[in-house]
């Protein structure tokens, strides 16, 4: 299939391999799908040094022109300079028709260059997620980049509506492009005995929560629910550990359930894949999401899901997950207990996840690119 758009530059200055979470998955899967669906499309990925090395090691040089700019995600000032100035300079040098910023932030002005921004969510503007200075700075960049853009992408209708209500944007400016679901498993699972030994899991049942440890992810609700869960259940929190991790450990100790809680920290793809296969239930007590990719990942693997009753997870999960109020530990315990080993819900999840395709995401993204070029060149 030929591409209506000939050349695009992707702003991936957010990329810190292994720590970037959902946006990193989005980048990797979208590049693969765009390259497959539109083989004549010239794709340039502008990213950090560590990001370029990781993508090159995974063969992305065969799909795109991967270019490292002099900045890293953990160096905020250099990253901001690169994103605001160097990204569009290099995009123009490659002859790109448009610049697509993949992770909500982007240049606040792109004169003479069509711009598309994917806005995942505005959770950081609604809930304590970062420090005050960081929150203010990100709010300015996200808002101004969105208003400069010629087209916007949201990954769910719920996220679009929340973004529009928060930033005062027009819903008509958005193309809603849900994430897809690639083949599973993503890696050959590590040996089960080794993973159980590594995390001290014994031979009991496992409730798995895959998410960065941040307050809005609300993992403390699962800890409060633990005393009401069956005695053989251990909760594993698999995700990047931030300051919130100490709050979670302290709460587990105060409730006397620290022996049934594991904070895994970094896991390889093989180790995480084994945890998915071991899980009797996947639980997600988040208060806010742009899409909720781990819910889709759990369903695709046939793992029964219990999750927060919020609009975006209803949109992604449909009638498959057991839903609970993210403020009610008792309701969470009841939902998790009902989900444990529910094979029927597991099968329903596989069918539901099959409806999410990265090919369709690539097509929706191309629609947004065409909208951007029409807006930029009336």
Image (tube, rainbow, N blue to C red):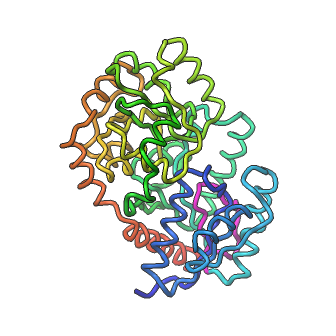
Residue at 55% across, 78% down: 63
Q: Nearer the viewer, residue 112 or 313?
A: 313
User: Where is 207 relative to 92, above or below?
Assistant: above
Q: Check the picture and name the quadrant holding the N terminus.
A: bottom left
Left or right, 358 with reference to 351: right
User: Where is 250 relative to 181, above or below?
Assistant: above
In the rendering, at what x and y percent does residue 100 appear? 59, 68
| Magenta residue check for 378 | no
Left or right, 225 with reference to 32: left
Q: Which residues are magenta?
A: 97-113
User: Where is 155 relative to 96, above or below?
Assistant: above
Left or right, 184 with reference to 29: left
Q: Nearer the viewer, residue 79 or 65?
A: 65
In the rendering, at what x and y percent does residue 299 appear? 32, 49
Residue at 45% across, 55% down: 155
Left or right, 205 with reference to 106: left
Residue at 71% across, 79% down: 92
How many numbered circles are shown? 0
In the rendering, at what x and y percent does residue 138 appear? 68, 46
Residue at 45% across, 72% down: 33
Q: Check the picture and name the quadrant holding the C terminus.
A: bottom right
Look at the magenta stretch and give its main secondary structure: loop
In the rendering, at what x and y percent does residue 25 appear? 51, 58
Q: Which residue is at the far left?
A: 344
């Amino acid at each position: 299939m030929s591409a209506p758009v000939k050349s695009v530059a992707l702003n991936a200055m957010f990329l810190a391999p292994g720590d970037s979470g959902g946006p990193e998955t989005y980048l990797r899967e979208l590049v693969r799908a765009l390259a497959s669906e539109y083989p004549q499309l010239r794709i340039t990925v502008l990213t950090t040094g560590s990001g370029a090395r990781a993508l090159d090691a995974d063969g992305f040089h065969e799909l795109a022109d991967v270019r490292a700019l002099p900045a890293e995600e953990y160096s905020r000032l250099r990253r901001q300079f690169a994103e605001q100035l160097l990204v569009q300079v290099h995009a123009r040098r490659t002859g790109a028709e448009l610049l697509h910023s993949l992770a909500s932030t982007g240049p606040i002005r792109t004169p003479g260059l069509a711009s598309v921004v994917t806005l995942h969510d505005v959770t950081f503007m609604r809930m304590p997620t970062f420090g005050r200075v960081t929150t203010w700075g990100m709010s300015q960049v996200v808002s101004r980049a969105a208003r400069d853009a010629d087209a916007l992408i949201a990954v769910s209708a719920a996220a679009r509506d929340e973004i529009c209500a928060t930033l005062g944007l027009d819903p008509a400016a958005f193309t809603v492009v849900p994430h897809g679901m690639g083949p599973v498993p993503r890696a050959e699972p590590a040996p089960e005995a080794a993973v159980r030994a590594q995390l001290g899991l014994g031979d009991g049942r496992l409730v798995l929560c895959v998410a960065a440890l941040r307050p809005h992810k609300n993992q403390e609700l699962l800890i409060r629910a633990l005393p009401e869960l069956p005695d053989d259940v251990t909760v594993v929190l698999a995700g990047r550990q931030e300051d919130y991790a100490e709050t979670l450990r302290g709460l587990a100790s105060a409730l006397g359930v620290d022996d049934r809680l594991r904070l895994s920290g970094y896991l390889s793809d093989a180790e995480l894949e084994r945890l998915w296969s071991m899980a009797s239930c996947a639980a997600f007590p988040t208060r806010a999401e742009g899409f909720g990719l781990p819910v889709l990942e759990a369903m695709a693997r046939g793992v029964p899901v219990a999750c927060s009753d919020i609009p975006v997870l209803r949109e992604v999960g449909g009638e498959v997950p057991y839903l609970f109020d993210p403020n009610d530990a008792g309701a969470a315990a009841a939902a998790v207990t009902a989900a444990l080993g529910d094979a029927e819900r597991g099968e329903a999840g596989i069918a539901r996840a099959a409806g999410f395709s990265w090919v369709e995401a690539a097509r929706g993204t191309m629609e947004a690119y065409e909208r951007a070029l029409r807006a930029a060149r009336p």
